[in-house]
Amino acid sequence: MATGRRASPKRAAPRRQAASGDFESRVVAAALALAERQGWRRTTLTNIADEAGLSLSDLHTHLRSRGAILAACMRYFDQVALAGPPVDKDEKLKDRLFDLLMRRFEALKRHRKAIRSMARDSFGDPAALLALKRLLISMGWMLEAAGIPTAGLSGMAKRRILALAYLSVLVVFLRDETRDLGTTMAALDRRLSLIEPFLGL
């Protein structure tokens, strides 16, 4: 009769968890690539997980819906705009806000086809409501970075007004084929001039 000790079953090595920032950047890159390649409406959560090299369980742990992934994409473009050079404190508030928003459009430029697909295919999609809520947060960050207070009811009104102006310029941007985004810049300048009194600039 064998008396040797029973071999303990082999355990799978634990999967190394990516840092949350790295994880989200991978998901954003995957979502943008798929939206450009096959359209956002046809892109599933499984597609995004596969493209990012993640399991569906990993994706679910951090980003549990298409709306959450759209919101993650918006956070990414927030970071690009906020990570640029500090705004010039000697400039007018309107000019600071213009510079920050143009940084966003410059970052969006290389993903224009994907953004166009996401915008078009989100109409009628309840998941897009989360992205719209995130847009208000994004506009709050742009206002704060420009030195414009966003606290209280007046701040909420400013965020909503800027979000509407931003969306109207986004429509122009998606059709703007100029190399320097001159058409987008002109549209943004006009919109900011129009809402300037409501933002307290």
Image: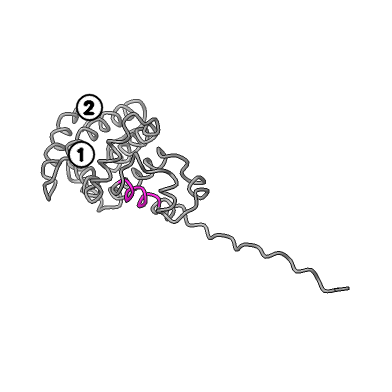
Label 1: few (<14), some (14–19) or many (≥20) C-alpha neighbours in 10 Å:
many
37 with respect to 102 (left or right): right
Please tell me whether residue 34 belongs to the stretch shown in magenta: yes
Q: Residue at x 42, y 50 (%)?
A: 24
In this rendering, position of residue 43 left or right of residue 199 = right
For label 1, the SS is: helix
Where is residue 180 drawn, in percent x and y? 12, 49
Q: Say which element carries label 2.
A: helix
Tag 2 residue: 198
Q: Is residue 200 left or right of residue 27?
A: left
In the depicted structure, whether residue 13 falls above or below residue 29: below
Q: Amino acid at mark 1?
A: Leu
Rendering coords of residue 78 (x, y %): 32, 45
User: Which numbered disc, 2 or 1, marks the residue that appears first in the sequence?
Assistant: 1
Q: Is residue 197 above or below residue 144?
A: above
* Image: magenta residue range: 27-35
Tell which of 76 and 119 is nearer to you.
119
Q: Nearer the viewer, residue 93 or 183?
A: 183
Residue carrying label 1: 93
Q: Amino acid at mark 2?
A: Phe
Residue 81's spot in the image, x, y percent?
28, 48
Q: How much space separates mark 2 and mark 1, taking CA atoms?
A: 13 Å
Q: Quadrant of residue 195?
A: top left
Dominant secondary structure (helix, strand or loop) of the stretch shown in magenta: helix
